Amino acid sequence: MTFICTPTENLDPAKAVHDFTIAATRPWSHVIKRGQIFRIVDVEGCQAVDTLFYRAGDFSERYSAQDTLLAQGSAYVTTGTRLLSNEGNVMLTVVADSCGRHDTSAGACSCEANTVRFGHHTRYMHACRENFVVEVTKWGMTKRDVVPNINFFMNVPIDPDGRLAIVDGISAPGAHVDMVAEMDVLAVISNCPQVNNPCNGFDPTPVRVLIWDGEAA
Amino acid sequence: MTTTDKAARIEALRQRYLELKAAGDDLAPKALPPLTARDGAPLTSNLVRQREEIPGGWYWTARLARGERLRLVNTQATPGVAVFLWNAADTSERYNSADTMKLQWTAALPRGRVLFSDMGRVLASVVEDTVGAHDSVVGGSTPASNLRRYGDAALRNTQENMRLAASKFGLGKRDLAPVISFFSPVYVKEDGSFGWRDDVLAAGDFVELRAEMDLLVAISNCPHPFSPGAYAPQAIEAVIWQGPSPAGDDICRTATAEAVRGFENTDPLFAGR
């Protein structure tokens, strides 16, 4: 298994136009302008960051996991991956990645899916899709706008026989992924509240998001 | 919480996860039924409600009542038939590719597996299946994939077919999400790239879904974007019929702990019927 890692870019956090730490289990959303650089930092390591993107100005165009995998011909996301919309347009391009492995097949946890996966006693626990719904409703959207997402820093290998499971993440403390926005996008994050699987080591931790204007790079 | 308590809690959660994973990885596949024989499971024709031929490249819609079955017969071994499903009573509930794979610990969805909605409920069961090679990871073709693959973006494709099918139910682009492509032997190689298993598909293959709730169904009969060869979609046959009601020991409902819990979430919707 090859993990493609690229070196950290020389971007100064002090020059970021947006710098926010998303507490463990909490949601966040923000519009990223075309040309801006979007960084997600896995502050303490091994934290899955469930993320969706919508085109600013037309939220019916949104991140498409299948279009992304189809276009790049690979099951995982890393440096060079173009994140595609359901219109086949490039929303963002991954330009740096010190982790090397991100998932976009396994989606986000929900209260309902957790009952199936882990037992009915897990129904009333924080879940990513609850975060997504709360956050997208602020922008006039509803549950029907929540689609299978991308999970930064989450490791979900799929073997040739199809077996698929979430296994321990490989992101070290401070690991980050950088993307350049190719259009104005609304980014929505649920900082994974899941404690039932190893996507965050059963112990959710904060992540940091930074946005730089393009000329900062 | 002390550091020791936290470590103990994490260890307990990890042990529970590993037990569930072992059950999903190792035990569940052994409980699944074998593939249907190509000359097996004949239709009982007097129970057929509708029989349609869907031309190559085209789309089709249907409504299924809970308990009805939809058989897709790949009469000419066309490589890929994409399907999307909604709960007819509330279309915000719909097929969820990620949950369907994650909840069953596998991207392989042969006979015996079920298709989950985003609400932890079962939309449909795969009750018959002569192929056992279906793709929920990559999905269907798009204008861009047809341009890359065949040099022609105007060829009929699944993205547009699904939008057309959705529109016939009064639904739109926002109501669509990743699809499942039957008759699509896609697999993931060790390096993460995709492969296509040759010699898997044969004329006369079929897949049969049993509706586990009242459904709206959209079908796109276009080649899977990774299928080899020229763009040459052939007609398939779709048959809606009333099969037997599931027995208490129905294999799709009982083969895995995940399916059991999925039906525990689904059946109460229909308790009065």
Image (cartoon, helix red, strand yellow):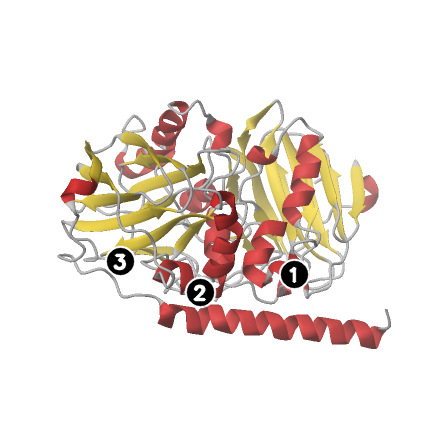
User: Mark 1 — residue?
Assistant: A121
Image quadrant occupied by the C terminus of chain B: top left
Disc 3 vs disc 1: Cβ atoms closer than 8 Å?
no
**Is there any visible trace of residue A178 in the rendered image?**
no
Label 1 crowd bin: few (<14), some (14–19), many (20+), radius 10 Å: few
Subunit that carries the residue with mark 2: B
Q: Residue A165's spot in the image, x, y percent?
A: 51, 63
**Residue B184 left/right relative to A135:** left
User: Mark 2 — residue?
Assistant: B256
Q: Does mark 1 fall on the same chain as mark 3?
A: no
Q: Amino acid at mark 2?
A: Thr
Residue B64 lies in quadrant = top left
Give the residue at the far right of this rendering: B2
**Residue A127 left/right relative to B192:** right
Secondary structure state at the residue bearing disc 1: helix
Q: Residue A82's spot in the image, x, y percent?
A: 51, 42
Mark closer to the observer (3, 2): 2
Q: Amino acid at mark 1?
A: His
Residue occupying the point 28% across, 32% down: B151
Image quadrant occupied by the N terminus of chain B: bottom right
